[in-house]
Image (cartoon, rainbow, N blue to C red):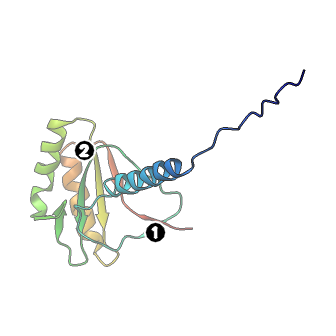
Amino acid sequence: MQFKSQKKDRPDIIIIPMIDIMFFLLVFFMLSTIHMINVSAVPVELSSMHNTINSTAESLIFSIDGKGEVFVGDQKVDRTLVGKYAQAALAVNSNVLIIVRTDKKSAYNDFSEVVENLKQAGVKRLALAAETRY
């Protein structure tokens, strides 16, 4: 009596759907990281520092450009109103991080006035923005 040899076929691995999924994931992560970048700030040329830390905490950003003008996000404000903006942000979230971005060409006096106004407004969490130096 002869038995038929049952040849087991291996299942085919279809790779095209896996490539589609990987492409979708790549596009998803690329687009989601775009929204992590703060695009509502005035462009300034930051100083560079060693050992900088990236923060993802909720923050309010003050920028000082090379001419000494102060901005909240991308809106120009008077230097004397900096404290009022900080107090409004603290009223909404008492744990808000205040970030000061200063252009390399700005005067130290402009920076010190903004920091002094923030201290008088009761800001406890203050950070300085800088580029990472390698």
Count of residue discs: 2
Q: Residue furthest front?
A: 1
Residue type (three-letter) at the residue carrying disc 2: Val
**What residue is drawn where x is 81% and y is 28%?**
4
Q: Are marks 1 and 2 in contact (CB under 8 Å)?
A: no
Task: Determine the CA span between mark 1 and mark 2.
Answer: 24 Å
Q: Residue furthest right?
A: 1
**In which image quadrant can residue 95 be found?**
top left
The local secondary structure at tag 1 comes to strand
Q: Whole-percent x and y of residue 12? A: 63, 43
Q: Whole-percent x and y of residue 32? A: 35, 51
Q: Whole-percent x and y of residue 81? A: 9, 56
> Could you say which is closer to the camera, residue 89 or residue 119?
89
Q: Earlier in the sequence, mark 1 or mark 2?
A: 1
Q: Residue furthest top?
A: 1
Disc 2 marks which residue?
123
Q: Is residue 72 above or below residue 56?
A: below
Disc 1 marks which residue?
48
> Could you say which is closer to the camera, residue 107 or residue 101?
101
**What residue is drawn where x is 13% and y is 50%?**
85
Q: Whole-percent x and y of residue 9? A: 71, 37
Residue type (three-letter) at the residue carrying disc 1: Ser
Q: Is residue 4 above or below residue 40?
A: above
**What residue is drawn where x is 38% and y is 51%?**
28
> Could you say which is closer to the camera, residue 15 or residue 27?
15
Position of 54 with respect to 120 (left or right) is: right
Position of 109 with respect to 132 (left or right) is: left
Screen quadrant of the C terminus: bottom right
The local secondary structure at tag 2 comes to loop
